[in-house]
Image (spheres, rainbow, N blue to C red):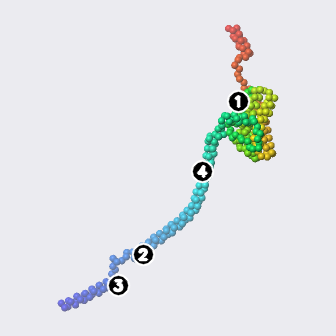
């Protein structure tokens, strides 16, 4: 037993040394459980490094692309800002032009704007017609001018009707067509044209008058022309015409001249303005009486040709020649039968 005890002790000592060797750092046995699977794989390490480098390159490329996009965005932003400003300016100009056009259209389309120029009583028109034949004496202060167009417009239409009446009562050959267009063009052309010319001349001579007042003054001045032509177209005496031309036409002309003198400063300006108006007004009356019919006849000859047959009415009664022809025909038919 004693022998067996030492033998076990020796075996234990041998195994104890093995255990010491197992616990020590010089053991050849490797504990696989405590080993890191990736610590010894160089292939996997290279793959990770390559993957990391690739990701870094992609990040750098993305950063450069982002910087380029930012630069392009700034450039495009400047262009876009300029384009937006241009569009805003163009839209603003369009809106301003549209507003002005609509304002002008409403100005001319609204009938209420013309109402003050035609809102007049017949009694006032009659009084102004009589006043147009009476020259004013006071020229030291500006004379009042009616700013309405109803009376002048009616006088222009009356003058048109008198001219048509004179064409029918005269010996002028009336061809096919209407003469109303020529008469309207003559009367309205004189009224508007001479009013505009005298207004321009008054502006140069520093006369205090507006365009509406000039139209009213010259329009009422045609009242003497209407009276003169209406009488002399029905009573064909040249001496009577000259009397009416001097008296009636002269009174209406003196009325206009006196009003313009009261509104003009300076002797030279008065002489130029009033002399021009008086000459045009009196010569227009002479033209309407002596030369208007011939001018219209010449215009018709030019437009239609000199060989055009005159416009004549068809007679209702059968002429004597036609009766003789009918009687001869009836006798020949009776003898034949």
Q: How far apart are labels 2 and 1 at the CA level?
A: 117 Å
* Residue 161 placement: quadrant: top right
Spot occupied by residue 114 in the image (x, y as percentages of width and height) = 64, 40
Which residue lies at the image location 80% right of the left edge and 45% below the top edge?
267
Q: How far apart are labels 4 and 1 at the CA level?
A: 49 Å
Name the disc covering residue 42, or none: 2
Rendered position, 15 above or below 281? below
Spot occupied by residue 81 in the image (x, y as percentages of width and height) = 58, 59
Q: Which residue is mark 4?
A: 95
Q: Which of the two discs, 2 and 1, labels the residue nearer the N terminus?
A: 2
Q: Which of the two discs, 3 and 1, labels the residue nearer the N terminus?
A: 3
Q: Which of the two discs, 4 and 3, labels the residue nearer the N terminus?
A: 3
Q: Which residue is mark 1?
A: 177
The kind of secondary structure element at disc 2 is: helix
Name the disc covering residue 25, or none: 3
Q: Which of the two discs, 4 and 1, labels the residue nearer the N terminus?
A: 4
* Residue 306 placement: quadrant: top right
Numbered marks: total: 4
**Quick check: marks 3 and 1 in contact, CB under 8 Å?**
no
Q: Residues within 10 Å of mark 2 (few under 14, many from 20)?
A: few
């Amino acid at each position: 037993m004693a022998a067996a005890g030492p033998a076990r002790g020796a075996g234990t000592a041998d195994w104890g040394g093995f255990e010491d060797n197992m616990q020590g750092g010089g053991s050849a046995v490797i504990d696989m459980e405590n080993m890191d699977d990736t610590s010894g794989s160089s292939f996997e390490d290279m793959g990770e490094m390559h993957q990391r480098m690739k990701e870094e390159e992609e990040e750098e490329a993305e950063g450069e692309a982002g910087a380029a996009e930012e630069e392009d965005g700034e450039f495009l932003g400047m262009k876009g800002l300029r384009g937006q400003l241009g569009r805003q300016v163009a839209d603003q100009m369009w809106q301003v032009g549209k507003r002005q056009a609509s304002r002008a259209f409403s100005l001319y389309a609204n009938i209420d704007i013309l109402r003050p120029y035609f809102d007049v009583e017949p009694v006032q028109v009659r009084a102004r017609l009589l006043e147009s034949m009476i020259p004013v004496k006071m020229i030291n202060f500006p004379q009042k001018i009616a700013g309405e167009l109803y009376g002048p417009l009616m006088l222009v239409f009356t003058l048109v009707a008198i001219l048509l009446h004179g064409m029918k009562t005269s010996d002028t050959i009336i061809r096919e067509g209407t003469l109303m267009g020529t008469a309207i063009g003559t009367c309205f052309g004189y009224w508007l044209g001479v009013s505009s010319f005298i207004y321009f001349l008054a502006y140069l001579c520093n006369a205090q008058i507006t365009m509406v007042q000039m139209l009213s003054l010259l329009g009422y001045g045609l009242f003497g022309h209407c009276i003169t032509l209406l009488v002399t177209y029905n009573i064909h005496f040249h001496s009577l015409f000259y009397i009416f031309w001097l008296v009636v036409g002269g009174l209406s002309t003196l009325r206009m001249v006196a009003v313009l003198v009261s509104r003009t400063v300076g002797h030279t300006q008065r002489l130029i303005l009033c002399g021009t108006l008086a000459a045009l007004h009196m010569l227009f009356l002479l033209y309407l009486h002596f030369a208007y019919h011939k001018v219209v006849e010449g215009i018709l000859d030019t437009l239609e040709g000199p060989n055009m047959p005159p416009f004549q009415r068809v007679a209702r009664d059968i002429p004597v020649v036609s009766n003789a022809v009918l009687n001869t025909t009836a006798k020949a038919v009776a003898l034949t039968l």
